[in-house]
Image (cartoon, rainbow, N blue to C red):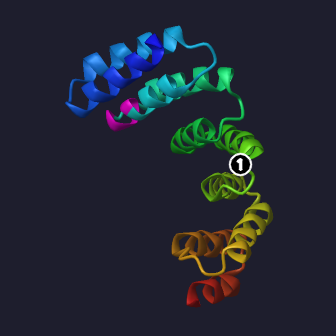
Amino acid sequence: SREQSLIYGADGAAQQGNIAAAERDYMSAVALSTGHIDAHLGLARLYEQQREPHKERAILERALIAQPNHALANYLFGKTSLDINRFDDAREAFRHGLVAQPENIDLLVGQAVADDMLGNHEDAQAIYTRILRANPKANLVGLRTNLAMSYLLSGQAQKAVDTLKH
């Protein structure tokens, strides 16, 4: 289809460093889209690489109109929301993404981070603990660090120390 051809062209232009052509082709594909969001996601990644968070956020908002529970689109939107301290928006985005992928660790961690930033430390700690229990052999050092920080934020210093000892 024409939409897919434009996406391929945009991907190629981006790889060659032709940002203007990539943006143009992605935007053309977005305009042709009938519910697909591949072009939106490609354009969002381009904007992320170009450090244009306002444009990235705007195109992700358009993607989420077409597919409100898309896991990756919600994850990316949640990340941009965390970056600008819109923690309620971030938490909602991560929750919507979890509708499609309820065990997605990135979405779960994002929700936990947003919960911590909103002061919902018990909710965040429950999410972190659930992930750790479900993945006992995984190397989740960053997640343990987040859990320890959550404990510190909620005044549980000893639990933070115990968590970091592992």
Judged from the image, the secondary structure of the residue bearing numbered disc 1 is loop
Q: Is residue 126 left or right of residue 117?
A: right
Identify the residue shown where x is 70% and y is 69%: 131
Give the total of numbered labels.
1
Membership of 48 in magenta stretch? yes
- Please, which residue is most extreme toward the front here? 1
Q: Position of residue 72 (x, y in %)?
A: 58, 41
| Residue 67, image x, y percentages | 68, 27
Image location of residue 33, percent across then percent down = 55, 13
Residue drawn at (42%, 14%), measured in percent from left and top?
Answer: 27
Which is nearer the eye, 138 or 154? 138
Q: Taking 62 as reference, is 166 above or below it? A: below
Left/right placement of residue 47 relative to residue 15 reads right
Task: Bin the neighbour count of mark 1 within 10 Å (Cα to Cα): few under 14, some 14-19, many 20 and up.
Answer: some
Q: Quadrant of the C terminus?
A: bottom right
* Secondary structure mainly formed by the magenta segment: helix
Q: What's the residue at 71%, 48% (across, down)?
A: 101
- Considering only vertical position in the picture, is 159 above or below 14? below
Q: Relative to the observer, which residue lies in front, 72 or 123?
A: 72
Give above or below for 31 relative to 63.
Answer: above
120 left or right, relative to 43: right
Residue 110, image x and y in percent? Answer: 63, 53
The image quadrant that residue 78 belongs to is top right
Magenta span of residues: 46-50
47 is within the stretch colored magenta: yes
Question: Which residue lies under the disc numbered 1?
Answer: 101
Picture quadrant of residue 75: top right
Give amino acid for label 1.
Gln
